[in-house]
Image (spheres, coloured by chain):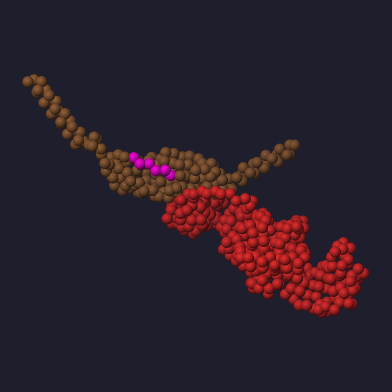
Amino acid sequence: MKSKTIGIVSLVCYLLILTPCAYGMGIGATPATMEIEVGNSESVQKTITVSNPEDAEMEFRVYNEDESIDWIHISDPTFALEPHQKKEVTVRFVPTADEMGKFDTKICIVSLKIEDGFNMGSGVKIPTHITIKEAAVPVYTNPATIILIISWLCIILICVDRLRRH
Amino acid sequence: MKSSTLFVAFATICVALGATGIVSAHQTWIDIDAMCVDIGDTVDVRLTEGHNFAGEGAPPFDVSAELVDPAGVKTPLNKTREDDLHWHSGFDSDQIGLYTILGRHVDEFWWKVYTGLGSRPDRPNSTYTYFPGEVNWSEIDKSNWTDDWHVVRHYKPYKYSKAFVSTNCDFSEADRASEQPLEIIPLDDVATTGTGDFEFQVLWNGEPLPNGTIAITGTRDVETKVSAICDDEGKATLPLNISCDWLITANAASDSAYWDGEYNDTSPHGENYTGPGGFVGNDHRAALTLLQLRGSNTVAMRAEIQSEIQFSVTPTYLDFGELGLGDISDPATIAIRNMGSKDLKSTVEVTDTNGLYTKGLRINASLWGEFETAVPADESVSLDAELHVPENFAGSGEMEGTIIFWAEAI
């Protein structure tokens, strides 16, 4: 009985040792590229589907390659996926009012196996071209319109005041 | 398949079954565990001999094997051990693609003698008696033999065997000849074995033998066999309708079909024998092992839209071993498999804190930073990674670092 238990434990240990060797470092992502058009002060969001094609759980990290662009926000920067599982990650583009023009960056998704020694990983780079245009400002938020309305209100108030005095 | 072709195939099968009488000869074949393996796996190659695809022992006398790797390079497979059932060898499948394993077994000389019905008490229905090696005809008890007994064949058996192993489960190149003297070539996709008619070609030194010379047989077990006669192109179709492991064998279709030798009327015979004499020469036979790749005949419907980018890198760990200053490691093979719908451009990024990998890692003989390769959709590429330890490297012990294989659609 004792030797049988030792045998089973040995087999389990053997399988545990072998399991990490049975898969590769794989990653999947869709779309392959992104084209974004957004007004300044507006926000646009896109979805990236990240998949784990391997037979083992994998850890993923999603980030924007160009660190100088701080108005791109990733909904889930790090997560783990079970074998053959997929996950949708939302990328929000929220340029400030000062940002205008065309920007190129890459959204990077990487799966890395961390162990002692020389670690290996696989990653996908999604080239992302962003065009930021001047936002179409609504009439009620246009400063000129606001000044005009305030001016008219002031004129009306002055007129009303003078009519009362007479 | 056209109805006329089906008829011809059916007719040849019937002829073959009649001609051979489902006689099972001693065969030698290659045993492997699987035809689809992972890159880096060690493939156990075993040669065995027996009947009806049931191994009975390790082949005796002269046995050898060689390997044709995906690049077409042939290397000998050395014997690692032998047990009651097998002659063992093996190899590491470190390349992407198709490996062809070729076996060769040369047995001792044998005699096949027509001795008549009832001449063998152990096999009352047999009309032939077989003797290995040298025979002293005057000392043999012939009391049960017919008086027209005669040597049908005195032959040296040459048994060629073949099997396929693929690291990407792609057998599209299995229809290439491997220059075996007698060779069975699967003309249909071996991944479809067990789903219906399967066409083979049998070549002798690269050329077909005349129509009717070769019988080809598919054997699952003693009760499940199909046979056909090869035409003047060496081609024949076998109805491999059962999803299982098959042993395909090819040999002379009849006692009058042997070609590597001559018929000799001075062969030993009984006093009332008046025939042309027996065949003296070599008996060549071939065997091809086809293992089952699919689990059942059930067809389910399923569809999954591929990711635009999807790839896998193997192995998951690189160990360059113990190296000294100025040393160059053995190359480590890395495979990148593109499973997505887009062609990919792959680059490498290496980081470390000690400079060992960033200064010394080379991919395909170039420094890693210069490496870039295209990986078309549904294809794989293999790379060689080497670590060159700088002469002035200051660190010691296990060095940490990271390599990331990046992919981008092109």
Residue B266, horizontal then vertical, whole percent: 83, 79
Residue A99, above or below A155: below
Q: Residue at point 65% right, 69% down?
A: B235
Quadrant for residue A9, please give it: top right
Q: Nearer the viewer, residue A66 or B368?
A: A66
**Range drawn in magenta:** A43-48
Evaluate whether residue A96 shows in this view. Answer: no
Q: Residue at point 76% right, 74% down?
A: B256
Q: Residue at point 61% right, 58% down?
A: B192
Kindly give the residue lying farthest to the front in the view shown: B3
Residue A58, above or below B10: above
Is B90 in the magenta? no
Q: Residue at point 61% right, 54% down?
A: B37
**Which chain does the brown colour mark?**
A
Residue B145, above or below B317: below
Residue B54, horizontal then vertical, whole percent: 75, 57
Tag count:
0
Q: Nearer the viewer, residue B259 or A66?
A: B259
Quadrant for residue A4, please give it: top right
Evaluate whether residue A107 shows in this view. Answer: yes
Q: In the image, is A39 to the left or to the right of B163?
A: left
Q: Quadrant of the C terminus of chain A?
A: top left
**Which chain does the red colour mark?**
B
Q: Quadrant of the N terminus of chain A?
A: top right
Is A47 in the magenta? yes
Q: In the image, is A102 to the left or to the right of B121?
A: left
